[in-house]
Image (cartoon, rainbow, N blue to C red):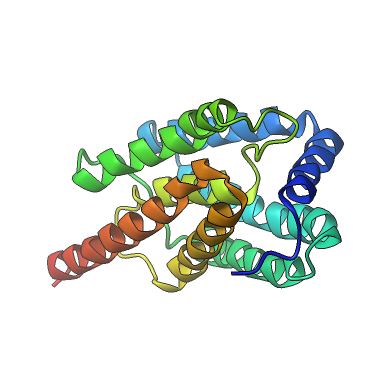
Amino acid sequence: MQIPFSLGDFLNVFKDYNQAVFPLQIVFYSIAFLCIYLIFVKYRKSDKIISAVLSFFWLWIGIVYHIIFFSVINKAAYFFGALFIIQGILFAVWGVFRNDLTFEYRKSAANVVGIIFLLYALIIYPVLGYQLGHIYPYSPTFGLPCPTTIFTFGILLFVNKKISVFLLVIPLLWSIIGFSAALNLSIYEDTGLIITGIIAFILLLVSNRKFSVESR
């Protein structure tokens, strides 16, 4: 895939974004850990809060990162932004308004993998990026597409009933697009993106089959 910008241009977008929104990165980490907490310690509106957070992250990335910042160097960002906005709306509709997304820790294999994905998105990803020379502000911080997509897959692995495949298509598509760009730009921490996308998609389809059998 031909990239219409240089690595330097790409990293400068991270710099411009990170400097413009700081200290929101800290806020994003805080609400991400809140989501994890709400999976393990349930409250009456835990599921809606988690869904609202996922919706917010995808809308934020679509509007702020893709359309406002990334579009400066790549006009395809408008298309990417539209995908993220659609995904944010889907999370709002399915999880907040319809309450069709419920999350629970069940000591299952999917939950174990979900924990690993969450650790990768929030801790391993930035540490690995630092070791690879992607140092703040020239780094993809949490709240940007790739680590947030990994985080999303990690959270979805805690869904405790059948999940609509419509909610998985755009994250899976982005895991492929993001990984392809990562190979061209040497953002090797994004290798985890395609791995989490494929594994989570398969595990969620298996879970769907299991929940369908149990509901009969």
- Residue drawn at x 20%, y 68% is 209
Q: Which residue is nearer to you in this view: 204 or 144? A: 144
In the foreground, 32 or 6: 6
x, y percentage for residue 25?
A: 70, 33
Quarter in which the C terminus is drawn: bottom left
Q: Quadrant of the N terminus?
A: bottom right
In the image: residue 213, left or right of residue 144: left
The reply to whether residue 4 is in sight is: yes
Q: Nearer the viewer, residue 27 or 151?
A: 151
Q: Position of residue 168 (x, y in %)?
A: 44, 66
* Residue at (62% x, 38% y) in the render: 142
Determine the image quadrant of residue 93.
bottom right
Q: Residue at x 51, y 43 (%)?
A: 188
**Residue 81 rendering spot, x and y as whole percentages:** 71, 65
In the visual, does 86 lie left or right of 33?
right
> Could you say where residue 213 lies in the image, as x and y percent from the top left?
13, 69
Q: Is residue 90 left or right of residue 153?
A: right
